[in-house]
Image (tube, coloured by chain):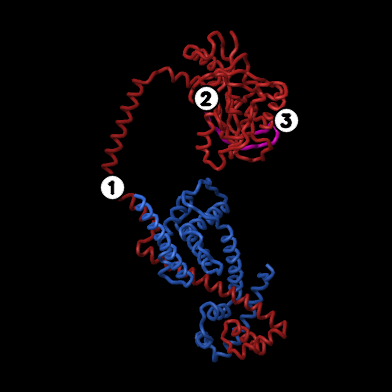
Chain colours: A red, B blue
């Protein structure tokens, strides 16, 4: 019985309904008896929780009531399936005829347009595309043919040569220094072509077969120096799973692809390269591999033939290594200043590509016939 | 020309201040459980949240649940002493709902492509964590109440949740006098406290 009175006293104390005199007495009691003090603390916590539950329930109740009220008034809408379908059906019935007319006009227009295109468009393109879709060896043959055709049109590739291979390259210095793969430069000379189709003569400065990195320099009056490259070249390692993207020229147009870093080492545990997962094709070789902040983390170089989507890239560290080595002997290389800051961080991919694509080139290496 | 420019700027500013005051009034109304304020906040924000959830694999019921959950989180935030409104109610509710829904989708093992939010969002992680902690606490109390059995459960609910007086309760439950009802309430309360504190650790 005493306990009931005590608890009642605690409750009255906590909800403030004690008179001043009683309260003073109770507080004295609390001070002197640790057990009672503990009970007060515990009960306060308990009452807070149950008060919280009470508030919660009331609020939920009020919210549901508000929901129903607003539904009734039509301020909010929960399209029950039947009414929803009804509406669509109504619309269909109402606009059936208009829709039919619109559809037939669209159909006729489409037929006319496709007819006109068939009539007016130059035919030979079709066969090209089909050939490109063919087997890999055919692609190479095709490229040769393409090279030959270019000879007729453009003067940058000397007349008496044949294009031996092609790939991608990217600027490491706005003055015109490019990096690509050594295996792309199977030939004695090279031209580079930007994404607008403008060709520039390039000099091969160094081919390092061991690291599979080559450096080119654009030597062409038409080339305009880029003062600030938008990307930087990363010195440190990147993490597994990091999102990456690449730009390259598996065909005459620049092509974008994205993927992720899937292994820190390359083929057979090669630590100078890494494995990435994205779709790459012949011609992507030498292209830059960016991380999402727009730092170049590698040079796309090879892919495994026996498995899908296993692509290897040379780590960007290798570029620094090669340039540093060459600086000791080659005066041309001494002028290279590699970009260390990226202005692409936080930008959308579309904007990043817009800034970067001007710095990625198609390389065509040629040999004397 | 220049004058005109300043004039509009001022116009915008007063409008913003007015809106802020309006939102403060609404939040006070929400804390006091006023149906007018609740209706207004509900009406102005529900449709946006509903379309977000419907567009992301959710149903009408999901939208209702998530939105009401967010309203409760807003209520808790507005009630806390340290409360400051750092963004619009709309932004806050949308952010909470977005987080809650993404979490739920993840829980169900479905992912939606993390497309950039079209609407502005604010960081609500801390608030949500607090909200979830409170929800967990309340769940313990609800469970304790649930396992209490009748008539204890109704008796205690009448007193602590519906705030009825002991005389009213004793009449309602058919006790001969208020003292007997009090006695019974005490027994029930002891059991409830035992059940509650068995799961709720003060140390946490």
Q: For the residues tagged 2 and 3, is the chain the same?
A: yes
Q: Secondary structure at mark 2?
A: loop
Q: Dot 3 surroundings within 10 Å: few (below 14), some, or many (20 or more)? A: few
**Rendered position, A11 above or below B197:** below
Using a 10 Å C-alpha cutoff, classify the residue at mark 1 as few (fewer than 14 neighbours), some (14 to 19) or many (20 or more). few
- Which circle's residue, 2 or 3, is located before the other in the chain? 2
CA distance separating discs 1 and 3? 68 Å
Residue range in magenta is A254-275
Circles 1 and 3 on the same chain: yes
Residue A137 in sight here: no
Q: Chain of mark 1?
A: A
Query: Is mark 1 in CB contact (under 8 Å) with mark 2?
Result: no
Residue corresponding to mark 3: A270
As measured in the structure, the alpha-carbon distance from the residue carrying label 2 to the one carrying label 3 is 38 Å
Tell which subunit mark 3 falls on: A
Residue A19 within the segment the image draws in magenta: no
For mark 1, give the secondary structure: helix
Quick one: A364 or A276, which is closer to the camera?
Answer: A364
Label annotation for residue A246 = none
Reading the image, the residue beneath label 2 is A224
Camera-side mark, 1 or 3:
3
> In this orientation, which residue lies closer to the viewer: A107 or A46?
A46
Residue designated by label 1: A93
Disc 1/disc 2 C-alpha distance (Å): 63 Å
Residue A152: percent from left, percent from top: 48, 11
């Amino acid at each position: 019985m005493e306990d009931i009175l005590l608890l009642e006293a605690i409750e009255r104390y906590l909800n403030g309904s004690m008179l001043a005199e009683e309260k003073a007495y109770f507080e004295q009691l609390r001070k002197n008896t640790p057990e009672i003090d503990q009970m007060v603390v515990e009960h306060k916590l308990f009452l807070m929780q149950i008060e919280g539950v009470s508030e919660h329930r009331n609020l939920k109740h009020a919210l549901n009531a508000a929901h129903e009220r607003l539904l009734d008034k039509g301020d909010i809408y929960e399209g029950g399936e039947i009414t929803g379908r009804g509406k669509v059906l109504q619309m269909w019935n109402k606009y059936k005829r208009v829709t039919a007319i619109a559809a037939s006009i669209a159909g006729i227009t489409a037929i006319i347009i496709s007819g006109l295109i068939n009539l007016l468009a130059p035919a030979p393109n079709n066969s090209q595309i089909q050939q490109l879709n063919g087997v890999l060896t055919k692609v190479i043959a095709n490229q040769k043919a393409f090279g030959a055709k270019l000879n007729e049109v453009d003067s940058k590739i000397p007349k008496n040569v044949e294009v031996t291979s092609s790939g991608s390259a990217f600027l490491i210095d706005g003055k015109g220094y490019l990096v690509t793969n050594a295996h792309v430069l199977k030939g004695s000379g090279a031209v580079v072509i930007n994404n607008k189709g403008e060709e520039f003569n390039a000099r091969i400065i160094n081919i390092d077969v061991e690291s599979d990195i080559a450096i080119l320099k654009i030597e062409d009056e038409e080339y305009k120096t880029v003062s600030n490259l938008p990307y930087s070249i990363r010195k440190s390692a990147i993490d597994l799973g990091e999102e990456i993207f690449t730009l390259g020229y598996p065909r005459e147009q620049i092509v974008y692809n994205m993927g992720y870093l899937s292994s820190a080492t390359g083929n057979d545990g090669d630590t100078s390269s890494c494995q990435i997962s994205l779709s790459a094709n012949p011609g992507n070789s030498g292209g830059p591999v960016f991380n999402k902040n727009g730092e170049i983390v590698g040079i796309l170089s090879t892919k495994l033939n026996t498995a899908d989507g296993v692509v290897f890239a040379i780590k960007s560290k290798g570029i620094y290594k090669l340039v540093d080595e060459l600086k000791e002997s080659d005066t041309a290389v001494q002028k290279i200043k590699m970009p260390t800051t990226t202005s692409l961080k936080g930008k959308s991919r579309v904007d990043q590509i817009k800034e970067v694509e001007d710095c990625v080139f198609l390389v065509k290496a040629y040999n004397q016939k | 020309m220049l004058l005109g420019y300043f004039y509009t700027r001022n116009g915008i500013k007063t409008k913003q201040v007015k809106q802020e005051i309006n939102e403060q009034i609404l939040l006070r109304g929400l804390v006091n459980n006023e149906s007018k304020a609740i209706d207004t906040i509900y009406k102005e924000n529900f449709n946006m949240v509903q379309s977000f959830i419907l567009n992301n694999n959710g149903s009408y019921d999901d939208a209702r649940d998530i939105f009401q959950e967010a309203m409760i989180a807003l209520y808790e935030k507005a009630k806390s002493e340290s409360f400051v409104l750092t963004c619009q109610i709309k932004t806050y509710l949308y952010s909470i709902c977005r987080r809650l829904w993404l979490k739920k989708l993840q829980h169900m093992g479905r992912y939606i492509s993390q497309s950039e939010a079209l609407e502005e969002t604010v960081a609500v992680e801390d608030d949500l964590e607090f909200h979830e902690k409170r929800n967990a606490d309340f769940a313990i109390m609800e469970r304790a109440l649930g396992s209490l059995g009748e008539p204890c459960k109704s008796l205690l609910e009448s007193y602590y949740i519906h705030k009825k007086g002991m005389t009213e309760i004793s009449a309602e439950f058919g006790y001969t006098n208020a003292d007997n009802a009090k006695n019974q309430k005490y027994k029930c309360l002891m059991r409830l406290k035992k059940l509650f504190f068995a799961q709720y650790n003060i140390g946490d």
